[in-house]
């Protein structure tokens, strides 16, 4: 039921999970009674079901009660289900339904309703919170027409009511939602399935928290959660959706677009505030979302991502398609600030654009493709559109095609603003523009444009609109303003300025105006090509540049030249000079002007005129005519002149009218070469003339008429042309040469020429057959062959030349010659000459013998009397002939040979000339074949007699060089006698003798027992050649040929046949005894470098080369102006120097000189050649026991063949001992293949050959194979090598092998060597260029590179390279070395070398042989290597208890200065150098020099150690070569604390000082002074202590090495007995008294020693003194003889004690004495005299004595026998002089005594 409670007060709103906004209603309150009943019911339910009355009440009254209350609250009918379950905390109702109302179609039906609560809270707090759950509800919601969803308001809930709704839940709900569109119509229902939600009411509904999950039936799912605060109206939502169909989403909201298809993903945080814009954060993703906008003709499809940030929506590259328009949208829409959106469209055709926008295109043609960028800015309600448009393909607008159009447009308030537009027409140029297009008036938009054109081709542009301009206009630059109405051309108005490119120039105008179809302007023209203006002027004048100022006007539609008006002035500028046109007028196609010509080059007007006539033209003419008309209609009057470089041509009274012209032409001093460029140089001169000429403009020669004279003045004389007449194309004149110098005309002529010649001819036929000439000529010195004056009269009629009275000294002749015209040159068809000549020079005769014998030199004179008649081809000669001093080539005949000559074509020729000895006879048949001949000159002679068809020829001592020249001639004239051009080009000598038979019919020649003495062919020299020769049918045969040369002998047989297809050759050579030196000498091979040129002969200099080209009489090198003796002396010294150089070269050369190659060989060679198969040959050569210096070749074998261009070697081998090098394979011109084998080649010998540096000694046997491929021009090769028993420095290597490749002129190789079983292979890789001598393919570059790598245990290579001096004991390390550079191709010398390498070690241990017990440990560091040095970046290690640090650089091979030398820093080392030093070391070392020869310098401090001075003669035989080469370089040694210098067992000193050390490690050379502070010298049984307070030094000299010079003072004390036994003669009968010592018999003798000398000579350089004074012999006895005395007197025990005490206690007592500051301290054995002092029955005691010298003469001492109880004894001694001493002693007990001693020894 529904009750109206509008009068009730409403206190609050009840918010459901769907948050809606509704208008407020009047408040109402639930009745108190209802609440009591509700609370009572709940309480009763809470007490349980024990009370039957309560249960009955629940069943009967609870459901109706709740139904009534909900109906009142919801203001709509509610039908509650019955109670299905009841407990103290929960009530379940059955099927429940909330029905619709007449105004609200919303309804809910559910399967059940669950109400949960806690009754204790009601009892305790008078508050009951309930949780309501709707089970599987079906919900229908429909939006109202006003957009509200809650059409029926709920009653408010009193916040103080004891019952409060805590949570409302929907479980598995199905919901149908019907929203309304913008038109108020219902949208399609949206069905939600599996909807579940929970709404929690918190803090008395101050906060509502809710969450909804549901699936759309059409697809997609969403989740909405949030918190709402009703009191503030604020709501925070989290909206998540996945795969939501946008069509369903569109049905839920009133959108301005219709969502057709697509999906939506969303993850948004939404914040709703009262009266504020919603705030969103998150992402929304659109998937192919299609929407329909009512105002657009097509749907819009969008894909992309939207990002929300408060009021800002960010479009992240959202792809949008609208019809054919595809775009990418990016930017933001801010609901507060407005738009900032950019949309970039993909290219679209203009036609598709109009179709997409559903607009008709304009009437003009429009095509192309564009892309655009649209920017939307401004506020939400007033957007602003900026559009950037660019074409992507050529575009057509109207009739104009554009390469590119760019535009920036702005649309605002129905106005389209063109901010900037750039258009690039395909015809060229550029158009910029701005403007405005008003769209307020439909179909008649107005435009106002400002256009700038740059380089626009105007003529081409207007032609597109079928408009013809009067002139050909090029590019235009213009600025113009155009306005009007679209599609109305007549409305066009314009103003502007422009400059045009016209006819190669420019026309500028600033006042162009266009209005109503007319145009006008003031034009300024510059550099206009006149020929492009279509003006009918001579073409040559059109080549100038026109400039001027014109007033021009015309009609656009009547644009042709006849409708243009112009007036002004113009100037035509040619290359040089100009033409002015003043008062120029143009109207209706007629023109006129005053023409001025100044300084114009003639060639500018007539390009074909000779360059010599290219002078300057000056003139003034009045000219008029019509445009586009011929030259015949031009009228002109005036004058002109041509100023040439030399001379002048003047044309006065010029008149041109009706195509006819006339003028008076004169020339003044014009060089003839300026008029006739091809005139003979002999006629060069100056021309002066006067001519009256007339004609017409057609240029015909027949029209020219004229008269005048001319005179040519040349350097040889003057030629005058008199009475010149021109008429109807003919001319006549008289030429008179006067004293013409003939030598200047021709080098073959001499003298002067005079005469008169009348010439008649035609201007157009200037050739001999059309000329007639008659006259007389006088040659003052004759003509060639006739060197005397010659005169003649002649007549030429065009066909026959008649010569009359030819006269000269020694010659008279007359005759005639008839000439006939041919297609080519005129030829003589017959002649007759009668000649009488004497002493004619043969060389002057026109004899051409070069075709018979080229370059034949001959000389002599001739007398002849006779006739010569006939034709040039069949002449007949008869007469007497004499030859005087004839010489032909090198053949000099007798002075006079006389005889007759007769020749007739039908009879032949007979010549018979003879002198006293020489003869020249020749008889030729009519066919010019020889019948007999006989030539004799000196010792040479050759005769021939024809017998039928054979010629018997005998030759004697004919020079081969003469025959060689003859053979060269034969090879040019008779190809059947083919010889080798190479052979004929070689030097040939020798004398040929033999008899030959020449078969004339067949041409065969046979020679038997032909002999050549001393034959030489090229470099081939012999003693004699004999053999039989036959030539016939193009074949030459040699049989039994024998060639002998020095130690060689060859047998030759062969045949050579010439055929049309080529030669046939068969030859055999048997080598009976071949000698190597003969072969080398023949091939001119003297040095190894000569082998590079192969068989190509060398090119030697000539003697003339010593003189150069500048001064042929002065040599390039000369020994001053010395006399003969000095020159001989210089030559002697030069020879000695040359011999010395030869010896040095022999010592340093890796290989012996070729002159030392000795040996012989035998074999056979067979050769065959045919045109089909080419050359075929085989050879088999053997040689044994060859010697080459120290090398001996045991055997050589060369066997192979040559077939079809293929050389087969099978094989070629050389064997030396058990070493073998052999090659077998095939080689052709284009390909080659084979294998080179190397066996057992000693590396030791290769090392010697290659001069490997001494530190490296290689051993082993090299074995290798090389497979050859490619071609001779581009050989290829690949091979492998293995070294057996390989060793370096006598250390065996485990294995060594490698590979190498030769390709494209480059060697690439890789070698791997294994030092031991546990080491990795050492790798050496490289590449270097080398072009083999016979190869044509060059390396692509000259670069070479080497790469070496070793690591870890591989570094034991260090042991090998240093021969064990330095050893790698372990650790990690690596060495990498790269060497690169270039190789000089000719000499193979590397240059531009670069090397870089790196070596690093870590925790390594390295030992040196000189210190085997103290290796360098914990070594780590890095070393860089380049081409010439190694650089230590850092290297540290532990050594002998201290630290070592190394930095700096050290050269590798050669010593070079270093700014940062290698420095080794020591830190407290405990060094032990055997036999040198043992102790502490600190300081640094500088290593200079090179790695192979290091030099050690620096500053070293020694402390707490001992220096051993060894014997200079000692040598350490174990020192290596590197240590032997290691030098000291001013090494500074400083002796610090506790340094002992000793030479056991002789001396031992404590020393300080410093030394500078040089020398080597094996032999150091110190220099300096050492101060000796304390120490002793051991003299066998006594030690001499160093005396204090004196300068005790040891000075070292470098030349003495470790043998110092000592300057020391020492002292000691010895015990002396006064009862020494006296040595008597052993033969005496006297009995020696036994020694018996007591205290009175002993005394102490103080001994001093002065040492000045070298330590090695210590025993000879010591000076001894004592107190008491003793002789040196006695002192020596005291020092070393005490124990001998005791031994000699039977005191064996005491003697041994003395010796032991000295040896054992000497050093100890010295040390104690120095420590206590005593002058004397001794511990010595003594004999116990008193029996009371005996110990264990022993008479030997140990005594100690300490003494102090108070002065030099007064001393105190205390003495005690240590092994008795006897008290110590104090003694005092005072020496008065050398002989007198006062002594006293006392033990202050029972023994006191005193004495005065006087001693005199004699």
Image (tube, rainbow, N blue to C red):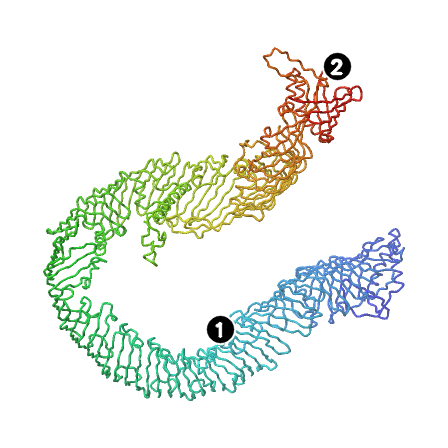
Q: Secondary structure at mark 2?
A: helix
* Numbered badge on residue 426: 1
Q: Quadrant of residue 80?
A: bottom right
Q: Is residue 83 left or right of residue 758?
A: right
Using the image as rendered, state which of residue 1686 and residue 1699 is in the foreground. Answer: 1686
Q: Residues within 10 Å of mark 1 (few under 14, many from 20)?
A: some
Whether residue 1023 is visible, yes or no, is yes
* Numbered badge on residue 1731: 2
Using the image as rendered, state which of residue 1237 and residue 784 is in the foreground. Answer: 784
Image position of 8 with respect to 1635: above or below? below
Quarter of the picture containing the C terminus is top right
Image position of 1569 with respect to 1125: above or below? above
User: Which-is-in-front pick, marks 1 and 2?
Assistant: 2
- CB under 8 Å between discs 1 and 2: no
Q: Quadrant of residue 730?
A: bottom left
Residue 1362: percent from left, percent from top: 53, 37
Residue 318: percent from left, percent from top: 63, 64
Residue 181: percent from left, percent from top: 69, 70
Using the image as rendered, state which of residue 39 and residue 1699 is in the foreground. Answer: 1699
Q: Is residue 752 left or right of residue 526?
A: left
Residue at left 42%, top 36%?
1240
Using the image as rendered, state which of residue 1280 and residue 570 is in the foreground. Answer: 570
* Numbered badge on residue 1489: none
Residue 532: percent from left, percent from top: 41, 80
Q: Is residue 538 left or right of residue 94?
A: left
Whether residue 552 is visible, yes or no, is no
Mark 1 vs mark 2, CA separation in Å: 147 Å
Image position of 565 with respect to 1594: above or below? below
Q: Secondary structure at mark 1?
A: loop
Residue at left 72%, top 21%?
1742
Q: Residues within 10 Å of mark 2 (few under 14, many from 20)?
A: few
């Amino acid at each position: 039921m529904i009750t109206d409670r509008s009068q009730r007060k409403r206190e609050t709103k009840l918010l459901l999970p769907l948050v809606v906004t509704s208008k407020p209603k009047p408040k109402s309150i639930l009745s108190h009674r209802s609440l009591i009943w509700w609370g009572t019911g709940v309480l009763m339910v809470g007490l349980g079901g024990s009370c039957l009355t309560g249960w009955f009440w629940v069943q009967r009254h609870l459901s109706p009660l709740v139904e009534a209350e909900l109906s009142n609250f919801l203001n709509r009918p509610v039908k509650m289900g019955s109670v299905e379950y009841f407990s103290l905390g929960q009530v379940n109702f059955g099927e429940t339904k909330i029905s619709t109302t007449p105004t609200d179609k919303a309804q809910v039906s559910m399967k059940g309703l669950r109400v949960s609560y806690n009754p204790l809270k009601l009892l305790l707090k008078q508050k009951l919170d309930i949780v309501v759950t709707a089970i599987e509800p079906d919900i229908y919601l429909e939006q109202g027409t006003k957009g509200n969803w809650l059409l029926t308001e709920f009653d408010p809930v009193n916040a103080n009511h004891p019952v409060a709704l805590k949570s409302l839940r929907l479980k598995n709900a199905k919901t149908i939602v019907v929203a309304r569109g913008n038109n108020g119509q219902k949208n399609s229902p949206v069905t939600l399935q599996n909807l579940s939600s929970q709404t929690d009411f918190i803090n008395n509904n101050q906060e509502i928290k809710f969450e909804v999950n549901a699936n759309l039936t059409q697809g997609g799912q969403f989740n909405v959660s949030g918190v709402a605060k009703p009191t503030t109206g604020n709501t925070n939502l989290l909206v998540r959706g996945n795969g939501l169909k946008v069509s369903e989403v569109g049905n839920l909201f009133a959108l301005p677009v219709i969502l057709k298809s697509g999906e939506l993903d969303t993850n948004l945080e939404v914040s709703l505030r009262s009266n504020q814009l919603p705030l969103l954060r998150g992402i929304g993703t659109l998937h192919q979302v299609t929407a329909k906008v009512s105002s657009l003709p097509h749907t819009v499809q969008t894909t992309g991502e939207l990002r929300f940030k408060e009021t800002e929506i960010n479009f992240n590259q959202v792809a949008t398609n609208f019809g054919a328009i595809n775009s990418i949208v990016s930017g933001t829409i801010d609901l507060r600030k407005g738009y900032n959106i950019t949309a970039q469209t993909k290219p679209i055709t203009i036609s598709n654009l109009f179709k997409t926008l559903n607009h008709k295109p304009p009437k003009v043609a429009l095509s192309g493709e564009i892309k655009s960028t649209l920017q939307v800015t401004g506020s939400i309600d007033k957007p602003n559109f900026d559009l950037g448009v660019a074409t992507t393909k050529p575009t057509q607008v109207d009739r104009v095609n554009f390469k590119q159009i760019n535009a920036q447009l702005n649309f605002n308030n129905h106005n389209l603003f063109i901010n900037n537009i750039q258009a690039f027409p395909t015809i060229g140029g550029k158009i910029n523009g701005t403007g405005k297009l008003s769209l307020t008036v439909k179909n008649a938009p107005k435009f106002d444009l400002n256009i700038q054109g740059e380089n626009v081709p105007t003529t081409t542009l207007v032609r597109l609109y079928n408009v013809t301009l009067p002139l050909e206009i090029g590019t235009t630059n213009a600025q113009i303003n155009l306005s009007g109405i679209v599609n109305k051309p007549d409305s066009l108005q314009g103003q502007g300025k422009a400059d045009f490119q016209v006819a190669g120039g420019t026309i500028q105008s600033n006042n162009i105006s266009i209005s109503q179809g007319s145009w006008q302007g003031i034009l300024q023209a510059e550099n206009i090509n006149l020929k492009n203006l279509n003006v009918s002027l001579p073409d040559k004048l059109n080549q100038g540049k026109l400039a001027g100022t014109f007033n021009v006007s015309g009609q656009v539609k009547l644009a042709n030249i006849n409708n243009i008006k112009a007036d002004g002035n113009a100037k035509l500028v040619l290359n040089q000079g100009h033409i002015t046109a003043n008062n120029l007028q143009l109207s209706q196609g007629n023109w006129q002007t005053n023409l001025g010509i100044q300084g114009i080059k003639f060639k500018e007007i007539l390009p074909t005129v000779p360059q010599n006539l290219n002078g300057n033209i000056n003139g003034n003419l009045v000219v008029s005519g019509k445009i586009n008309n011929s030259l015949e209609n031009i009228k002109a009057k005036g004058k002109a002149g041509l100023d040439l470089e030399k001379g002048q041509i003047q044309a006065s009274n010029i008149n041109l009218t009706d195509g006819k012209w006339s003028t008076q032409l004169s020339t003044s001093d014009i060089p003839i070469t300026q008029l006739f460029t091809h005139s003979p140089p002999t006629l060069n001169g100056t021309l002066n003339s006067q001519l009256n000429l007339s004609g017409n403009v057609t240029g015909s020669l027949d029209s020219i008429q004229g008269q005048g004279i001319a005179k040519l003045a040349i350097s040889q004389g003057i030629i005058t042309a008199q009475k010149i007449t021109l008429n109807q194309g003919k001319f006549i004149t008289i030429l008179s040469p006067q004293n013409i110098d003939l030598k200047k005309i021709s080098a073959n002529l001499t003298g002067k020429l005079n005469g008169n010649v009348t010439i008649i001819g035609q201007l157009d036929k200037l050739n001999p057959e059309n000329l007639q000439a008659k006259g007389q000529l006088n040659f003052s010195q004759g003509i060639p062959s006739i060197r005397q004056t010659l005169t003649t009269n002649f007549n030429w009629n065009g066909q026959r030349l008649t010569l009359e009275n030819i006269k000269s000294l020694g010659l008279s002749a007359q005759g005639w010659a008839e000439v006939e015209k041919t297609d080519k040159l005129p030829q003589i068809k017959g002649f007759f000459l009668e000649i009488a000549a004497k002493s004619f020079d043969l060389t002057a005769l026109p004899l051409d013998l070069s075709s018979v014998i080229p370059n034949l030199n001959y000389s002599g004179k001739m007398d002849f009397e006779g006739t010569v008649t006939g034709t040039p081809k069949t002449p007949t000669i008869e007469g007497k002939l004499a030859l005087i001093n004839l010489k032909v080539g090198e053949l000099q005949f007798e002075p006079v040979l006389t005889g007759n000559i007769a020749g007739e074509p039908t009879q032949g020729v007979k010549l018979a000339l003879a002198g006293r000895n020489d003869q020249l006879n020749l008889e030729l048949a009519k066919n010019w074949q020889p019948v007999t001949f006989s030539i004799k000159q000196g010792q040479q002679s050759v005769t021939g007699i024809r017998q039928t068809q054979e010629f018997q020829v005998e030759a004697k001592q004919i020079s081969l060089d003469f025959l060689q020249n003859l053979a060269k001639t034969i090879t040019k004239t008779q190809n059947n006698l083919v010889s080798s051009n190479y052979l004929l080009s070689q030097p040939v000598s020798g004398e040929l003798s033999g008899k030959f038979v020449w078969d004339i019919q067949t041409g065969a020649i046979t020679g038997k027992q032909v002999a050549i003495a001393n034959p030489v062919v090229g470099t081939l020299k012999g003693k004699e050649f004999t053999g039989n020769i036959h030539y016939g049918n193009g074949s030459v045969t040699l049989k039994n040929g024998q060639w002998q040369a020095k130690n060689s002998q060859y047998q030759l047989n062969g045949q050579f046949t010439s055929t049309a297809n080529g030669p046939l050759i068969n030859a055999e050579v048997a080598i009976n005894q071949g000698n190597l030196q003969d072969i080398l000498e023949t091939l001119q091979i003297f040095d190894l470098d000569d082998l590079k040129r192969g068989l190509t002969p060398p090119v030697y200099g000539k003697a003339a080369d010593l003189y150069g080209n500048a001064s042929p009489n002065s040599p390039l090198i000369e020994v001053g102006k010395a006399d003969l003796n000095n020159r001989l002396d210089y030559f002697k010294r030069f020879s000695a120097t040359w011999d010395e150089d030869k010896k040095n070269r022999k010592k340093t050369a890796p290989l012996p000189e070729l002159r030392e190659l000795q040996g012989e060989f035998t074999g056979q060679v067979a050769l065959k050649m045919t045109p089909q198969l080419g050359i075929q040959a085989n050879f088999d050569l053997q040689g044994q026991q060859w010697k080459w210096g120290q090398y001996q070749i045991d055997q050589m074998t060369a066997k192979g063949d040559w077939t079809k261009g293929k050389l087969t070697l099978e094989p070629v081998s050389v064997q030396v001992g058990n070493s073998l090098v052999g090659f077998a394979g095939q080689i052709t011109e284009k390909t080659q293949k084979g294998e080179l084998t190397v066996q057992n080649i000693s590396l030791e010998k290769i090392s010697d050959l290659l001069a490997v540096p001494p530190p490296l000694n290689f051993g082993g046997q090299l074995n290798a194979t090389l497979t050859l491929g490619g071609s001779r021009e581009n050989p290829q090769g690949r091979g492998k090598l293995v070294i057996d028993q390989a060793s370096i420095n006598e250390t065996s290597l485990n294995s060594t092998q490698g590979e190498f490749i030769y390709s494209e002129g480059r060697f690439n190789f890789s070698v791997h060597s294994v030092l031991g079983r546990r080491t990795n292979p050492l790798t050496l890789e490289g590449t270097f260029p080398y072009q083999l001598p016979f190869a044509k393919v060059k390396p692509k570059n000259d670069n070479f590179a080497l790469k070496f790598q070793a690591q870890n245990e591989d570094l034991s290579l260090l042991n090998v390279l240093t021969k064990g001096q330095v050893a790698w004991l372990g650790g990690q390390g690596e060495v990498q070395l790269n060497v690169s550079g270039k190789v000089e191709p000719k000499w193979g010398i590397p240059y531009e070398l670069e090397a870089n390498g790196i070596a690093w070690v870590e925790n390594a241990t390295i030992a040196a042989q000189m210190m085997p017990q103290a290796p360098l440990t914990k070594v780590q560091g890095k070393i860089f290597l380049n081409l010439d040095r190694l650089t230590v970046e850092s290297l540290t290690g532990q050594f002998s208890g201290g630290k070592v640090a190394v930095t700096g650089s050290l050269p590798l091979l050669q010593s070079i200065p270093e700014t940062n030398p290698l420095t080794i820093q020591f830190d407290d080392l405990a060094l032990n150098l055997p036999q040198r030093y043992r102790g502490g070391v600190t300081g640094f070392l500088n290593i200079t020099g090179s790695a192979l020869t290091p030099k050690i310098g620096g500053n070293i401090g020694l402390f707490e150690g001992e220096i051993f001075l060894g014997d200079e003669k000692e040598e350490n035989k174990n020192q290596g070569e590197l240590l032997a080469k290691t030098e000291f370089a001013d090494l500074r040694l400083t002796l610090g604390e506790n340094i002992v210098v000793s030479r056991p067992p002789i001396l031992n000193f404590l020393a300080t000082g410093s030394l500078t050390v040089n020398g080597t490690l094996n032999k150091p050379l110190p220099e300096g002074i050492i101060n000796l502070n304390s120490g002793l010298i051991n003299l066998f049984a006594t030690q001499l202590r160093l005396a204090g307070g004196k300068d005790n030094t040891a000075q070292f000299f470098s030349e003495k090495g470790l043998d110092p010079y000592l300057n020391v003072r020492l002292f000691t004390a010895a015990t002396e007995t006064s009862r020494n036994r006296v040595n008597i003669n052993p033969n005496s009968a006297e009995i020696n008294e036994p020694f018996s010592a007591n205290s009175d018999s002993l005394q102490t003798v103080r001994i001093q020693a002065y040492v000045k000398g070298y330590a090695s000579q210590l025993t000879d350089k010591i000076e001894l003194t004592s107190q008491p004074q003793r002789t040196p012999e006695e002192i020596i006895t005291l020092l070393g003889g005490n124990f001998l005395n005791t031994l000699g007197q039977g005191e064996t025990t005491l003697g041994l004690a003395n010796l032991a005490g000295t040896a054992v206690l000497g050093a100890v007592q010295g040390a104690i004495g120095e420590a206590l500051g005593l002058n004397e301290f001794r511990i010595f054995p003594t004999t116990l005299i008193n029996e009371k002092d005996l110990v264990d029955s022993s008479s030997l005691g140990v005594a100690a004595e300490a003494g102090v010298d108070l002065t030099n003469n007064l001393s105190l001492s205390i003495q005690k026998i240590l092994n008795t109880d006897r008290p110590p004894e104090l003694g005092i001694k005072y020496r008065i002089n050398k002989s007198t001493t006062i002594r006293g002693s006392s033990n202050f007990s029972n023994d006191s005594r005193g004495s005065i001693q006087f001693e005199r020894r004699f």
